[in-house]
Amino acid sequence: MRHARQGRKLNMDPAHRKAMLGNMVCSLIEHGRIKTTVSKAREARPLAEKMVTLGKRGDLSARRQALARLRSKDAVHLLFTEIAPRFEDRQGGYTRIIKLGPRSGDAAEMAYLEFVE
C-alpha cells in the first residue's frame, strides 16, 4: 500500500524521475517557460518553487543545495543572480501552469510551466 506517499510515479523508476525533474527545472530556469505534460508540470512545480526559495536565501549552503538537485552550475548561477531577485518581495507562487489541450500524437494533456512576471 502507498500510505503517505506523495507525488506521481510517472511510469519511471525513482532515479529516472529525479533526474528528469531536475532537468525540467534547469530548462525552466534557463528558458523561463517549458512545454510539458500536465502531470510532469504538476510534479516539477514544487521543486521549481523550492529552488526559487533557495535562491532568495542566497547563502552558500542554499547554493550548494540547489547545485545538488539541479547539477548545472549555469542554471544555479542564473537562478541566484537573475530569477531569485525578481521574486524578492513575493512570498510564494513563483510559477504557473497554463493548460494547452491534448497533444496530437497520443492525446496527452499538454501545458506550459512558466515563471510569473
Image (cartoon, helix red, strand yellow):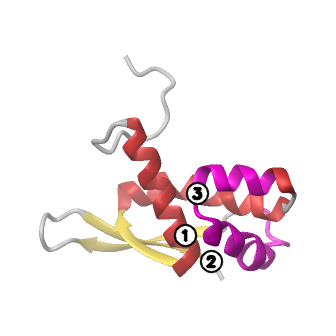
Q: Residue 96 shows which numbered tag?
A: 1
Residue under the point 83% across and 72% down: 88
List x then y, in percent, for residue 32: 55, 79
> Which secondary structure lies at badge 3?
helix
Q: Which residues are magenta?
A: 62-91
Residue under the point 82% across and 50% down: 61
Q: Work out whether residue 107 can be spotted.
A: yes
Residue pointed to by mark 3: 70
Assign the N terminus to one quadrant of the image: top left
Q: Earlier in the sequence, mark 1 or mark 2?
A: 1
**Could you tell me the amino acid type at mark 1?**
Arg
State the predominant SS element of the stretch in magenta.
Answer: helix
Q: Work out whether residue 50 can be spotted.
A: no
Separation of disc 1 and disc 3 at Cα?
A: 20 Å
Position of 35 with respect to 54 (left or right) is: left
Q: Is residue 3 above or below residue 30?
A: above
Q: Earlier in the sequence, mark 2 or mark 3?
A: 3
**Could you tell me the amino acid type at mark 3?**
Leu
> Which secondary structure lies at badge 1?
strand
List x then y, in percent, for residue 15: 42, 40
**Could you tell me the amino acid type at mark 2?**
Val
Density class for disc 2 (Cα within 10 Å; few <14, some 14-19, many ≥20) is few
Residue pointed to by mark 2: 116
Q: Are marks 1 and 2 in contact (CB under 8 Å)?
A: yes
List x then y, in percent, for residue 105: 12, 70
Q: Residue 39 falls in which quadrant of the image?
A: bottom left
Residue under the point 52% across and 71% down: 28
